[in-house]
Amino acid sequence: MAEKIKIKTSRFSFFGNYLLGMFLLIFIFIANLILKPPLILIYFLLVIALIFFLEPEGVILYTTYKLETDYVSEFSGIFVKKQTAIPYRNITDERLKKSIIGRIFDFGDIIVSGPKTEIKMKGVMRPEKIYEEIEKKLTYLRVERREINP
């Protein structure tokens, strides 16, 4: 396994956000032509649409995941970074989840659980590859434990 693998959330995983934002912009345009709503309502809906478009960028900036030599870690925060790490020897469960859209665009979530904490790698590209890397490390540790404790 490589020393460090850095993982970021994919923009494809926010397909729903972008779709809702576009729908809202189209709705605002059509409603403005037909109904002539109050200006405050248009501004309010524009702010909501902007949130749909900017939220993915915040999440992508805010969170990074790494597969280190001895542990899986999550770094979150923009100004102050918070690190959550689970050593491979303490991993109790690992799961891979993909939605229908995730299967189409090849992204998904990987959940790694330890005794007291959990790291959810949201919307990562090619999750099977990352999941296999974690499995390789866990298999190696299991074999190593059997050799030490026959």
Image: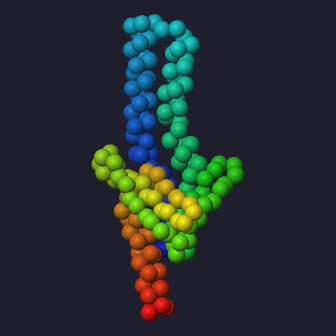
Quadrant position of the C terminus in the picture: bottom left
Q: Is residue 20 above or below residue 148?
A: above
Nearest to the observer: residue 81 or residue 30: 81
Question: Does residue 32 show up?
Answer: yes
Q: Colour scheme of this structure image?
A: rainbow
Q: Residue at x 49, y 27 (%)?
A: 49
- Image height of 134 relative to 109, above or below: below
Closest to the observer, 11 or 146: 146
Q: Quick check: 1 above or below 106?
A: below
Name the outermost residue toward the right: 80
Q: Looking at the image, which residue is at 34% across and 48% down?
A: 99
Q: Residue at x 53, y 14 (%)?
A: 41
Q: Residue 62's x, y, as percent?
A: 59, 48
Could one spot residue 69 in this view of the protein?
A: no
Q: Is residue 72 left or right of residue 17?
A: right
Q: Give the number of callouts.
A: 0
Percent from the top left, x then y, of residue 88? Answer: 51, 73
Q: Nearer the viewer, residue 32 or 72?
A: 72
* Residue 53 image position (x, y, % from top left): 49, 34
Residue drawn at the location 44% of the way across and 75% of the way down = 138
How far from the left and from the top, in percent, is residue 97?
37, 55
In the rendered view, would you say 149 is above or below 118? below
